[in-house]
Amino acid sequence: MIFTDQMNRTIRLEAIPKRIVSLVPSQTEFLFDLGLENEVVGITKFCIHPEEWFRSKTRIGGTKTVNIEKVKALNPDLIIANKEENTQADIEALEKIAPVWISDISALSDAFEMMQQVGEICGKLQKADEIVQSIKSQFETFENPFKSSQSIPKVIYLIWKNPYLIAGKNTFIDDVLQRCGLENLTQTDRYPEWKPQESETPDFILLSSEPFPFKQKDLDELQNQFPQAKILLVDGELFSWYGSRLKLSVTYFKTLFK
């Protein structure tokens, strides 16, 4: 069987995979929701959902610090990775062990494509389609919470501190922010450093729970500098996990921006 991943790479499989290693937390949870309990044999230390897998599955290091020998010992017939989450050096080493399917996700449509393609590879296309349709219908009926505003609210979405890093354009987070009716204050791509300036006038500053765990003290610091902004501590998983956790995102956004 021949498949093309989201990096336009071709991988060849002899059969439906029976021993899968997942290097991406959001994709690991999706594999669980596909019902691949027996097939998934290895995950990262950041694959915290579902908890029973986190406790029972072999952990092969972090997303950017994969223990290649641990993966090799698991004798996988498929490794599922991501362009942004995993390093090129690790991917090149892992390709010598088993076929590596890589996702590349910067929009909700890419997430849907990933889920359907992984579902097909794993012989679970019908279940993958059900998950995709459930998420898609929620986003399609999600009303812009700011549609009555005179202008589109501007937002800064922080993912790291010391230095501050923010989610920029051409990221999955940016696409989600737009679907929430918000405009990203930065026009820089990917994850640029942000140096707060009093001349900036964000309507919202969102402090993510991951990868940096922002706390109330961080909110208070920024609130002093931007008294006019609404600053919120937000669940980063529901803004950035591009697997089946998206089933929870729209309900969360409705509550967050009510």
Image (cartoon, grey):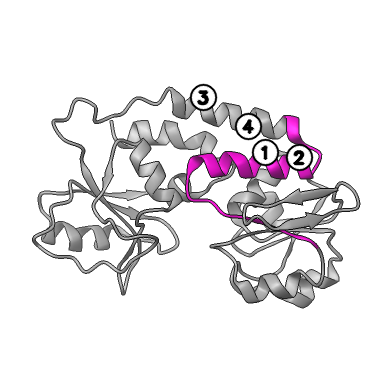
Q: Looking at the rendered structure, which numbered label has been put on residue 167?
A: none
Crowding around mark 2 (Cα neighbors within 10 Å: few <14, some 14 to 19, many 20+) is some
The answer to which quarter of the image holds residue 243 is top right
Mark 1 to mark 2 CA distance (whole Å): 6 Å
Closer mark to the observer between disc 4 and disc 1: 1
Closer mark to the observer between disc 2 and disc 4: 2
How far across and how far down the image is residue 1, in percent? Answer: 86, 48
Which residue is labeled 3 in the image? 137
Q: Secondary structure at mark 1?
A: helix
Disc nearer the start of the sequence (2/4): 2
Crowding around mark 1 (Cα neighbors within 10 Å: few <14, some 14 to 19, many 20+) is many
Residue at 46%, 44% (x, y): give it.
238
The residue lying furthest to the top in this view is 141
**Above or below 105: residue 214:** below
> In this view of the protein, can residue 191 be seen by the observer?
yes
**Above or below 220: residue 146:** above
> In this view of the protein, can residue 32 be seen by the observer?
no
Residue at 69%, 42% (x, y): give it.
117
How far across and how far down the image is residue 234, in percent? Answer: 36, 48
Which residue is labeled 1 in the image? 116
Closer mark to the observer between disc 3 and disc 1: 1
Mark 3 to mark 1 CA distance (whole Å): 16 Å
Mark 4 to mark 1 CA distance (whole Å): 9 Å
Q: Quadrant of the C terminus?
A: top left
Which residue is labeled 4 in the image? 131
- Specify the segment rendered in magenta: 99-126
Q: Secondary structure at mark 3?
A: helix
Disc nearer the start of the sequence (3/4): 4
Q: Are marks 1 and 2 in contact (CB under 8 Å)?
A: yes
Mark 3 to mark 2 CA distance (whole Å): 21 Å
Q: Looking at the rendered structure, which numbered label has been put on residue 120?
A: 2
Mark 3 to mark 4 CA distance (whole Å): 10 Å
